[in-house]
Image: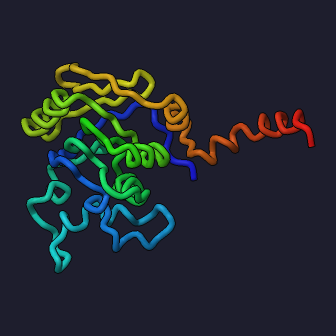
Amino acid sequence: MAYDKFNTLTSTAVPLPIENVDTDQIIPARFLKATERQGFGDNLFRDWRYNQDNTPKEDFVLNNSKYTGKILVGGKNFGSGSSREHAAWAVYDYGFRVVVSSFFADIFRGNCLNIGVLPVQVSADFLQKMFDAIDADENTAFEVDLSTQKITMIATGESESFDINEYKKNNMTNGFDDIDYLLNIKTNIQEFAKTRPI
């Protein structure tokens, strides 16, 4: 399933300064029955967003209308716990295209890259500067440039580089998942197959 191409994103951000956010908090296990990637955004951080009677919890950031944008800024060790793909699906389906943290669980990072969410790992110092900037002004904007692998605080111009696997970078630039990538080089694969013994 192809997804949106990612080149440069300029957006405000939603702060979630909580460490060790695990995948069960991102999308509780009771919502994992569906096999398609749609509809999971409704239950992103479900138990943090809603009371048992399904009324919104006023003190949770996703229920605060002053925070908007396609960038989610999380605390250290984001996406730990079980390997459920649905956690990345929920982040994407809600509308986030970038998650920033000072450390990501490897499997969650991979699941994000597979579906078009860019995990941007920054230093603890830069992460704190982002939280401080958002706290001072919820309209502060950031630029995430995949080609240069940099995230920039637009107001100050301060930036930091981030790492990404070259294959995943190419896929995100083209809006490919792994199947799309193979289909894109189908002719090359067929030509190579002709050179192999039967």
Q: Position of residue 68 (x, y in %)?
A: 23, 48
Residue name at image x 36 percent, y 39 percent: 119
Residue name at image x 8 percent, y 60 percent: 59
Q: Nearer the viewer, residue 69 or 112?
A: 112
Is 175 left or right of 151, judged from the image as shown? right
Q: Position of residue 153 (x, y in %)?
A: 22, 26
Q: Quadrant of residue 137?
A: top left
Is 8 left or right of 186, judged from the image as shown? left
Q: How many numbered callouts?
A: 0
Q: Position of residue 176 (x, y in %)?
A: 57, 42
Residue name at image x 31 percent, y 55 percent: 81
Residue 154 higher or lower than 36, as above or below: above
Residue name at image x 17 percent, y 60 percent: 63
Q: Position of residue 3 (x, y in %)?
A: 51, 47
The image's colouring method is: rainbow
Is 158 left or right of 8, judged from the image as shown? left
Q: Quadrant of residue 194?
A: top right
Which residue, as the protein is rendered here, is positioned at the far bottom? 53
Residue 166 higher or lower than 59, as above or below: above
Residue 98 higher or lower than 36, as above or below: above
Q: Nearer the viewer, residue 160 or 138?
A: 160
Q: Quadrant of residue 130?
A: top left
Image quarter where the C terminus lies is top right
Which residue, as the protein is rendered here, is positioned at the far right? 198
